[in-house]
Structures are given as C-alpha cells and as structure tokens.
Image (spheres, rainbow, N blue to C red):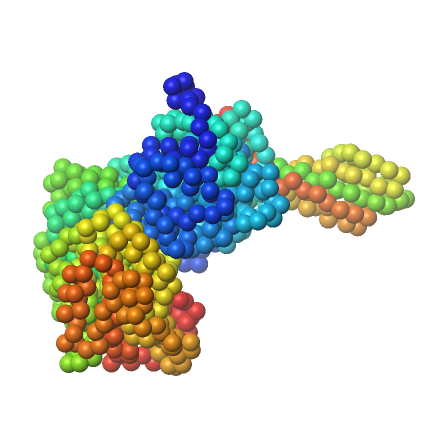
Amino acid sequence: MTARYAQSAPAIERHTISILVDNEPGVLARVIGLFSGRGYNIESLTVAEVDRDATLSRVTIVTSGTPMIIEQIKAQLGRLVPVHRVHDLTMEGPFVERETALVKVAGTGEKRVEALRLADVFKARVVDATITSFVFEITGQGEELDRFIGLMAELGLVGVSRTGVVAMSRGPGGI
Amino acid sequence: MSAATNETSLTGADIVLKALRDQGVEVIFGYPGGAVLPIYDALFQQNDIRHILVRHEQAALHAAEGYARSTGKVGVVLVTSGPGATNAVTGLTDALMDSIPIVCLSGQVATHLIGNDAFQECDTTGITRPCTKHNYLVKDVNNLARTLHEAFYVAKNGRPGPVVIDIPKDVQFAEGTYRSPADSMPKSYRPQVKPDLNRVEEAIDLLAKAKRPIFYVGGGVINAGPVASQLLTQFVRMTGYPCTTTLMGLGAYPASDRQWLGMLGMHGTYEANLAMHGCDVMVCIGARFDDRVTGKVSEFSPNSVKIHVDIDPSSINKNVRVDVPIVGDAAHVLEDMIRIWKARGKQPDKAALAEWWEQIEFWRARDCLRYDKTPKIIKPQYALERLRAAISGRDDVYITTEVGQHQMWAAQFLPFDKPNHWMTSGGLGTMGYGLPAAIGAQVAHPDALCIDVAGEASILMNIQEMATALQYRLPVKVFILNNQYMGMVRQWQELLHGGRYSESYSEALPDFVKLADAFGGVGLRATEVSQVDDVIAEMIKVKRPVIVDMCVDQKENCFPMIPGGRAHNEMLLGPDEKVENATPEDGMVLV
C-alpha cells in the first residue's frame, strides 16, 4: 500500500467564497483577522447585510492559494462561531461575479469626448458631470473594469472607487 | 422569550452569578479590580461558588486550565479590565492551543466610556479575538444571561477552547432579565460529533488489511472524556496494534501496557518514531500533526495511508495530507469503529502483525531512554525515576509541568495510565504554567497528590502563586529539577549555536528552600543521589505546599531528539552521537 497523494508543486488557484454570517459587531474583524493571522491572501472582500430580519450578512471573498490552503481557509471560516455557511462558488458549479466601479475623469476637448465615447462602448453610465469632469459608473467582470480604467488613464483619470466582487451561483438553487 | 416564569429582574452582577450556578460552576479563579467590583460584591453575598484569589491573572487562567483538565469541566476565570485582561492573554492563548474549555469574564469600563481611553480601558475583545475560540462584549444587560450560557456551550462543545465575555461596569449594575441555559442556544454553532459512517467503514477496511499499523493518539481523546480513553484502550487491545501518544495524549492509553510505544515526536521514543516512519496504515485520533510530532513534513511517514479522526475539520489536511478524513468526536468514532470491526468480523493479519511487533521490539531493545547512572551527582532522569517509584500504584496523582527539559523528562519517565492526570503546556509552551495548573488541580481534588515538575527558571515565572497555595491550604508539591540553566535553551545552544550559552545561565537564583519557608511552605533539598528518596518521601508525607530543590547534573541533555528539520528516522539517541550537522540549514530557522 502506498500513500495516495503524490507530492508535486501545487498550483495556485483563485477562489470566490461566499460566507453567510450573523451581522454582529466584530464579525468582519474575525474574518479579516483569520486571513491576516494565518497569512492567507485577500484579493477582494465585500460585505453587507442581506437579511434584516434574521440579521444576516453576506461576505464575498476572492482569495488565492494552493488547493490545501483553500481547503484550510474554508475549514477555518467554518469554525468561526457567527458563521452560518461557507460556499466555495468556484467549486460548486457555474456562478456570476460582478463588480462596480466609480471612475472620475477630468479633461476638456478631444479627450473628454473620447472618454464619453468609450464609456458608451463599455456601457458605463454618467452619474455626475461638470464642464471639466465626469464620474462614470461601470458594472461588470473585474477584467472589464480593469480595461475601462486602463483606457481612462490616458484620458485624465482622477480616481477610482471599486466595490470588490459580489457573486452568486447560476440557476434556481441557493447561493 | 417563551416562558414568563423564566423572567426575573436582576442586576447584571446577579445574573452573572445565577448563570454560573445554573452552569454548575463551583469554583472560579480570579483577581478583583475596579471594573469587576459589582460582580465581586455579588460573589461576597453568596456561598455556592467558591472564589480562589490568585496573585496574577495569567495564573488564574492556568489554574482554571488545571482545574478543567483534571475534571473535564469548564474552568472559569474572573478578571478586571485593562491590565487584568491583558495579563490573561497568555493563559487564553495557552488554552486555545491546547483546546481547554475556559470561560473568562472580564470587567470593562462603562459603555459610555468605551473608546475614550478611560482608566484601565483596553480593547479586550479586539486583543483577545485571535486567542479565544470566541469572545463577546455585552452592552445590554438583557443579553447577559444568554451570552453567558452560549459561552459555556461554545467553550465545551466541538473542539473545546477559551471564551471571553467582556462586561462593562454599568451593565453589571443595570437590571435586566434572566434566561435559562435551555433558552440560550447559539444560532449557528453546531459542531459535528457523529462521523460519516462510510468513512469509518473505509477506515476499518484499511485497518484490517494493514501489515504495519499504528495508532497515533492525541489530546482530543482526553477531551472526549474518560469514555473515549476506555474505548480507545478496548479497540487497540482488540486489534493488537501498537499505539503511541502525543505529549497532550499521555494517559489516553495506559502507559504500563505493552502495546504502548511511549510518546512520539521530537523527544519521543525511538520505537514510536520509527514505527510512525515505517507504518503502512496510520490512524490519528485527536491529534493534529503538530511540527513537534512530524519533524520534517515532507519525509513524515512516507509510505503510509493516513486516517485522521478529529472533531475540528480545520485540523484535517492542515499540515499533512490524509487519505481518510473522519470528522467527529473521538468517543463516537471509536464506538463506531469497534462496532463495525466486530460486525464485519474483522481480524488482524496475524503473520504480518507478528513481524511488525518483532521489528518494534528490536527498536524498543535500543532502550532509548537509558542514561548514565552516576554514584553521586543526581541525574534529572534518576530523580524522576525515583519519583515514579514513589507514586506508582496510586491513582490520585496529578502531574503538571513547566516548559523545557524537565517537561520532556517528566513526559518520558512518569507513568500515565489514566486520562486527566497529566497537565502540561503543549501547544504554546508556556513557562510558568505548572504551579498554577497544579493549584487548579488541587482545588478540584483536595486530597490528591498534585506535583508540579518544574525547572528553576520556569518556576520563577509564576512563583507568586505559592501564596495562593498557602492561602487555601493547597498542599501542592513543586519538584524543581535545578540545573541552573534554562536547560532546553542551553541544549539547543549546544547543538546549534556552537556552545555559546547566550543568557541561558540562571545567575542569582534564590535559595528555594528559604523561598518556600518565606511563603510559609516547606523547602527540601537534595544535592546527591543518596538523598533523593528521603526528600521525595518527605515531600509526599508533608500535607503542606512543598518546594523541592533537586540539584541535578547541569550538563544533562534530553534525548532522544529529532533535531529541527530532520525526519523521524534521523533521531539522535544520546550525547555520544555526532551533533555536527545535526540540523540542516533549513532546519535552523525552525524552533
């Protein structure tokens, strides 16, 4: 009999994890402290209350690590007392991920026109405008946002604010 | 709230006391201060719960750990805000690392002052978040009872651990509603205790087919209660397989049994470590593949199929990849294992097992714990062998230790046939643990013999607790193996740092006999072999706190030893073995 697991350099994987937690003081600190204390990566983290009656919040974390680390992250999250459920969306089938950014661009003349034209191509909405600036709102996949922001950098980008990823599984089933 | 009969208006402080009573608490360990005065006042006006006044909050935690580990109950602590809470942090971390159920109540400044840098304010929940299983800040007196009951539930269910409840002073004064324990279950915390039976079947199949099996057992079996140790012993004997235990698992399987190979790991026995290295099926029950146990992880037991039973899913596949993970309480899993083994009519492979035992006996014949007998100088191992002889046959002996060489020698040389009789700081390695832990054990077992095997450096970290022992007439014995060095530090400096004994010599030690006397206890000293037995006999006879100053060989090192970064089959058996290159360069960084 030999060990079933071969030793080879494990690949780093990106996972989107959705966690349902009691919305109580300190719960986010517990989640973040777990990641910093054990040296796990956080690529993005979002949190908001999703069920006011049951005072539940959903935390969506995008993280990366070897399969063994990802398994550890889920197990460690699962044993936090205020955590109800941990879903690894990456493992559980097809899911959608969305992120929203607000992008401020300042400029005049041709650059300003070009920024507006590109915003139209990317289906970004104008949520604020002055004679010399726009604030665009764009929602989509992370890479799509990256591309749009990259283009705006040439056209007078002033600043960006991003929400981080929210995600949900496809189909009729729960998260 | 359902039953109106449950509702009684009480002050926060009275709610605390009532909740403790309803949880069956008999003893709490603590130290008063401004922010817990209302609770101390309520404590003064009742007689159900006994309070043991320690001399430092760290010791309150360790005493509660000793109490918890020697009884299986939850240890309860009461400290004040600010420094009271920060002093508790070491003990909380210790309890977290060793999975000891503790509920620690801390006072906090009044809610309207929180965040104002008030006198003796600290962010207790913030500071203790990473060193507790869970913690709470109670801002509304009406949540106090529920929180207290939930804290007990969380502390003792699943993998046990410490829980802190921070209670602002105004909440202790405020009046609110009491709730019963049954009314206060946590919303989300439901640890799995019953295993997946398919996995257990799979494990039993593998076990029955094994040619070189081993049981590798940890403190989880002790945490699962005495019944788990009985079931383990029954199952190990049914199979005839060898069994080794971790430092925390000592006592889970009778040390006097032939099938026990001794402790494994860095200072474990030759036979236990080589059997782990050479086995083909390993059943780990309630242990966590700690780095002290595995040595070099990439060469740890390279050819075995590994079955891991643990109540904490995060312990599985953390350090070592296992083949059959079983999440559940050790007692439940062992019960299922025995039942399925019997139901399927499983038999061990007798021929293969005989061969395996022959190999193990060959390793055992190396007698890895032997040491040079000396006519005059007391070897620390000799002192412990004589202590072993003096306590053998008694089942009312509780041993605690500090941390260092003496701890490893105590683990190697003292007999542990039953669970809950051995208390040591395993995960955190806290010097200063032993004396307060012995006090906690003695409080729980007033007529028992509670011995803290100590080093002269460690004991000074919580020596003030002698006063606690005296105050409550707790006849604890402090058995110091005094070599005038921080022995384990000196040993590593000898092996890894060219014998440069940087700051590891204990200069200006107190006279421990006079020190015992000064506290009102009894001091005894042995400086040569001929005095050892008399001193031990006297120590046991005296029904008062005793400090024994056992002046031992200064240069003795603890063997066997797996140097950092080495595998189980690369042990050093004694001082004669070459220590050059004992540790490869990448092992130097390991502690």
For residue B584, side relative to residue A139 (left or right)? left
For residue B32, side relative to residue B49 (left or right)? right
Give the quadrant of the C terminus of chain B: bottom left
Visible in this render: residue B562? Answer: no
The number of numbered discs placed on residues in the rendered structure image is: 0
Q: How far from the left and from the top, in percent, is residue A134? A: 82, 39
Front one among B388 and B114: B114
Q: How far from the left and from the top, in percent, is residue A110? A: 88, 45
Q: How far from the left and from the top, in percent, is residue B536? A: 17, 66
Q: Residue at x 38, y 58 (%)?
A: B428
Q: Is residue B148 above or below residue B512?
A: above
Q: Is residue B424 above or below residue A135?
A: below
Q: Residue at x 65, y 40 (%)?
A: A163
For residue A109, side relative to residue B222 (left or right)? right
Q: Residue at x 41, y 45 (%)?
A: B78
In the rendered image, which quarter is residue B579 located in? bottom left
Q: Residue at x 53, y 29 (%)?
A: A55
Q: Is residue B171 above or below residue B63?
A: above
In the rendered image, which quarter is residue B180 located in? top left
Front one among B50 and B294: B50
Q: Is residue B495 above or below residue B93?
A: below
Q: How far from the left and from the top, in percent, is residue A33? A: 52, 48
Visible in this render: residue B440? Answer: yes
Give the quadrant of the N terminus of chain B: top left
Front one among B405 and A105: B405
